[in-house]
Image (cartoon, grey):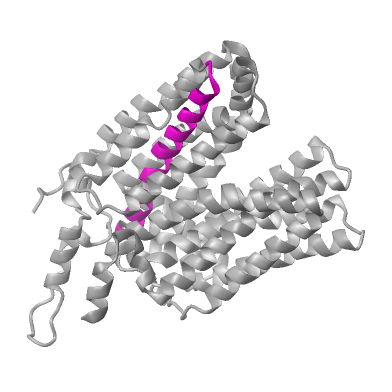
Amino acid sequence: MSSSVSTSSLPRVLRPFSGAQYRRLVFGLMLALFSDGVWTVTVVWQVIEIGGGPGQVSLASGLAATGMVISTLFGGVLADRVSQRSIIVGLEIVKMIAFGMVAICALTGVLTLPIVVIAAILGGITTGMYYPAYSALLPAIVEPAQLQAANGIEGIARPVLFQAVGPMVAGAVISVAAPAQASIIAAIASVGAALCYLLMRPVAVRRDPATLRGPVVRSVLTDLAEGFVYMWRTPWLWATLFFATVLVLATMGPIEVLIPFALRERVNGGAGDHSLVLAAFGVGAAVSSFVFASIPMPRRYLTLMFGIWSLSSVPLVLMGVAEHTWVFIVAGFLTGILYDGPMVLWGTLLQRRVPPALLGRVASLDFFVSVVLMPVSMALVAPVSHAIGVTTTFVLCGLIPVPVAVGFYLAARLWRDEVAHPLTDEAQAVAAAVVHDEMTGAAFVEPKTVEPDTVVSQADRDDPPAAP
């Protein structure tokens, strides 16, 4: 009782920290994000230091991205078959070896481009496999009512450590020493992350071992197919993922490619102005994640999530017509808020409603959609902007996702789905009240409102039961 009281007295955003398992996991996550942030900058300057040019930097970055995309789906299969804790420990060890190998070779004067490229590929693969394992592990160690706060903490840590602190540390170290020293820092951070995970108690795989029997190749392919079938039969899932593909395709190219050119043409801006816009995006993302981590799960969580995401591309319209640097900065801040806030709800939704045995694969589908179309968007935006102009490109990319979001929201009848499957604290309290009481012999009744989604008939999906 005392533990429960002390936990409930904490601010909502801090309640997950009451568990030792979560503390070790999140400290490991923070070190892993910091390590990746340092490496993202280090690998570029390491290529440059050994005489590489833009083509060699592009090669390393492109192969790393390819490794990340290819490994994501199989990472989801692995996360549903073996201990997720063991996976993330192994991934940090691989990163430590890759980053350390680059540092040692650079310090001894034997570093070559193929060595850096191999390390970059390994870094991409570990990134692709990390998210499914982490997403599947989190609900095994955090109470359902605390998942939203835990996802919000990740949403705060990612822009701060991966996009800001890690690159800043790397840049400072490289400026006063060399990329090799920055690689050492990245390797040490990965060792720290692995140690945090090793300090966690073992967590059992939440899947029936009987489903893992049979030839390995056939079993893996069956696992992949099950993930896609579950997505197709779950309206809220396919609606969100299909909309996400359009959102990523429309926005990532302009954000990553066109902003520097728009700044240069409109306000004679340079790298400093660009960094301010990116920093504003990160600050907006962190603020929004903190807000969503601090509030209860909304009753209309799907409506709120789609409503905000439908507007997340609109700040690009501001960038399309901006004539002052501060307008770009404000637009970047708004984009960060609108992009990352709903991610807290989305991660919680996956962990609360997807069956545990499928969570790794579904999380990998989510991550796959997020990354697979990024290079496509970046490749398309340049010729499109040359054909119709930078301003028109920004405006169209900012407006197209809005009706698409409305269309998928209506097609999947999401307003009915969220009523039939409430995730509020009150719903969780109802579930706790009906759990079997061995002291009194009360009957166990598992309410539908808190069960992970199961495959249902088309009639059930189209006309879910009324709210209790």
Measured along the vertical axis of the image, is residue 340 above or below residue 95?
above
Instruction: Tell me what residue is drawn at x 19 percent, y 53 percent.
Output: 422
| Residue 233 on the magenta span | no
Of residue 214 and residue 136, the one placed in the foreground of this image is 136
Instruction: Tell me what residue is drawn at x 57 percent, y 57 percent.
Output: 33
Which quadrant of the figure has residue 22? bottom left
x and y percentages locating residue 389 in the rendered image: 58, 12
| Residue 351 on the magenta span | yes
x and y percentages locating residue 332 in the rendered image: 49, 32
Q: Quadrant of the C terminus?
A: bottom left
Q: Quadrant of the N terminus?
A: bottom left
Q: Main secondary structure of the magenta part?
A: helix
Instruction: Tell me what residue is drawn at x 78 percent, y 59 percent.
Output: 181
Residues drawn in magenta:
323-352
Measured along the vertical axis of the image, is residue 280 above or below residue 90?
above
Tell which residue pokes out farthest to the right in this image. Answer: 109
